[in-house]
Image (cartoon, rainbow, N blue to C red):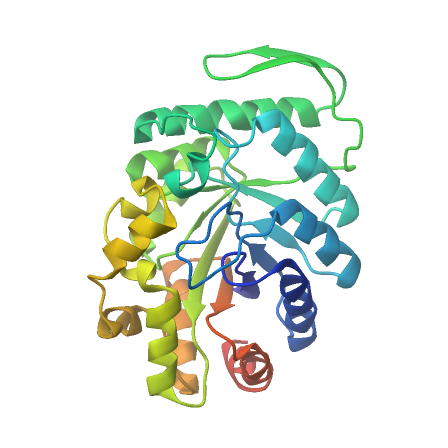
Amino acid sequence: MKIGYFLSCEEWGPRELVAQAVKAEAAGFEGLWISDHYHPWNDQQGHSPFVWSVIGGIAQATENMPVTTAVTCPTVRIHPAIIAQAAATAAVMLEGRFTLGVGTGEALNEHILGDRWPEADERLEMLEEAVEVIRTLWSGGVHDHRGRHYRVEHCRVYDLPEVPPPIVVSGFGGKAIDLAARIGDGFCTVQPDPETVERFRTGARRGKLVQGGTKVCWAADEAQARKTVHRLWPNEALPGELAQVLPTPEHFEQASQLITEAMVAEQVPCGPDVDRHVEALREYERAGFDELYVSQIGPESDAFFEAYRSEVLPRLR
C-alpha cells in the first residue's frame, strides 16, 4: 500500500499547503490528496483557499508528487465543464500526475449560490452526468450536451494532457459505491471497511484503484494532541449524513458541542506512540486499500514529517 499525505484546505492557507507538499515529498510520502472546500467545517480550522490555484503552486514546487483532489464536487457550485478545464490544466502542469477525485459534495460548500440542495439519489444522478460531461470534453474537439441537469454549448477544452486523468469517485453507502464501480477509474473513502472495498471491487473492472484518507495528530504530548483534535476537528465524530446536509460552519459548531474529547481521540491516533500510528494505517492495508493519504491535525507538522520519515513510514514498508 502506498502512503501519501493529505493536505487540508480547511486548516491551512495556500502558501502553507504548498510548503507542506514540499515537506511531504522530502519525508518520503508517495503522493498528495488535497481537499476542495469553499468553507471550513468550523471557524477554528479557519481556511479555505481555492484548490486549483494551490495545485498550480504544488506543480511548480514539487518534483514528482502525484496529486488527487479529495474530493471535488462538480455538480452545483461549479459546472462540470469548468471542472473539466481546471482538471485538464492541473494534469498538464503536473505532467500527467493528476487524478480527479469527485463526489456528491456537502451543503456546506454547495449552498453558497442559493441553489437548492438535492436529495442523495438526485446528487448521485447529477454526479454521473457531470462525469460524462467531463470525459466528453477531455476527448478533444467541440461538444454540445443537453442532459437532465447540465447543458454545454459549442464547448472545447484546448489545453489537454496527453492522457486524460483518472477519475476516482468517492462513495458512502451502497448506491454511491455501486456508482463508483460503474463510472469511476477508482474509488475513495475514509473508513477502513473491508466490506466497502469488496463491494466496490466486485462491481468494478479488475485493477481499479482504491484510495483512502485518514487523520492523525502527532505530538510529543498525547493529552495536548487530544485537545488539538477536539478543538479543530470535532466534526470527524459526527454521525450519519450530518456532514452532507448541514449548511454552515455555525451549524457544525453547534452539532459538535455534542462531541467529547474522548470521542474524537477514539477515532484519531493522538500523540507520539509509533505503534498506534502504524496500526491505524495498517487497518487500511488489511481492508484492501491500494493507497492511503494521512493528514496531520494541528501545528506540529514539522515534528510529524520527521517522525513519519524516520519511524512510521519505514515500519509500514
Residue 189, horizontal then vertical, whole percent: 41, 51
Residue 274, horizontal then vertical, whole percent: 43, 85
Picture residue at 40% right of the left edge, 24% below the top: 125
Picture residue at 40% right of the left edge, 63% below the top: 284
State the image quarter where residue 288 is shown: bottom left
Is 66 situated above or below 121?
below
Q: Is residue 38 left or right of residue 158?
A: left
Picture residue at 71% right of the left edge, 24% below the top: 139
Is 91 situated above or below 160?
below
Residue 137, horizontal then vertical, whole percent: 67, 23
Q: Is residue 164 visible?
A: no
Is 20 situated above or below 8?
below
Residue 23, horizontal then vertical, whole percent: 67, 73
Q: Is residue 210 left or right of residue 261?
A: right
For the view shown, which residue lies furthest in the bottom direction? 220
Q: Is residue 164 left or right of residue 309?
A: right
| Picture quarter with the C terminus | bottom right
State the image quarter where residue 256 is shown: bottom left
